């Protein structure tokens, strides 16, 4: 697996399969697979994020911004609560 981590906060923004290629640029981060662009991440770039490869210890319950990553370890963000699923949202209406 591969991850994209925001440098300042250490937040793990994306967890990606090894088959996805990550191309950071000065303006954005482009994801591609099989030589075709599949996603442009316009809110991040090569200056504010770092790519880590060969990640083998990603949490099974990963969500963007749920964990930080530092020194090869994932840490749950203090105070994190999972978002409500659709059933829970309906029940709260």
Image: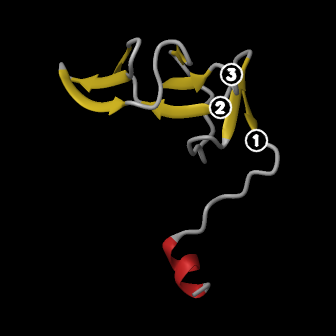
Identify the residue position indicated by label 1 in the image: 77
Q: Does 46 appear above or below 58? A: above
Q: Residue at the far right: name it.
A: 78
Answer left or right for 41 relative to 91: left
Whether the residues at callouts 2 and 1 have beta carbons within 8 Å, the answer is yes
Evaluate whether residue 19 shows in this view.
no
Label 1: element kind: loop
C-alpha separation, residue under disc 2 versus residue under disc 1: 8 Å
- Say which quadrant the C terminus sits in: bottom right
The spot of residue 61 in percent (x, y) is: 60, 48
Question: Looking at the rendering, which quadrant does residue 27 occupy?
Answer: top left
> On residue 8, which mark appears?
3
C-alpha separation, residue under disc 2 versus residue under disc 3: 8 Å
The answer to which of 50 and 43 lies nearer the viewer is 43
Question: Looking at the rendering, which quadrant does residue 8 occupy?
Answer: top right
* Disc on the earlier residue, 1 or 3: 3
The spot of residue 22 in percent (x, y) is: 37, 18
The spot of residue 58 in percent (x, y) is: 60, 32
* Disc on the earlier residue, 2 or 1: 2
Q: Does 6 appear above or below 52? A: below
Answer left or right for 37 relative to 10: left
Identify the residue position indicated by label 2 in the image: 11
The spot of residue 74 in percent (x, y) is: 71, 30
Disc 2 crowd rating (10 Å Cα; few below 14, some 14-19, many 20+) is many
**Residue positioned 60% across, 31% down in the render:** 12
Answer left or right for 26 relative to 15: left
The answer to which of 52 and 47 lies nearer the viewer is 47
Evaluate whether residue 25 shows in this view.
yes
**Residue positioned 47% across, 26% down in the render:** 44
Label 3: element kind: loop
């Amino acid at each position: 697996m591969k991850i994209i981590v925001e440098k300042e906060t250490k937040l793990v923004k994306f967890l990606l399969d090894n088959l996805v290629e990550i191309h950071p640029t000065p303006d954005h981060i482009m994801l591609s697979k099989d030589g075709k662009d599949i996603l442009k991440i316009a809110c991040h770039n090569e200056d504010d994020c770092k790519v880590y490869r060969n990640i083998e210890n990603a949490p099974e319950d990963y969500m963007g911004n749920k964990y930080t990553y530092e020194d090869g370890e994932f840490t749950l963000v203090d105070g994190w609560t999972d978002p409500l699923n659709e059933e829970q949202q309906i029940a709260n209406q």
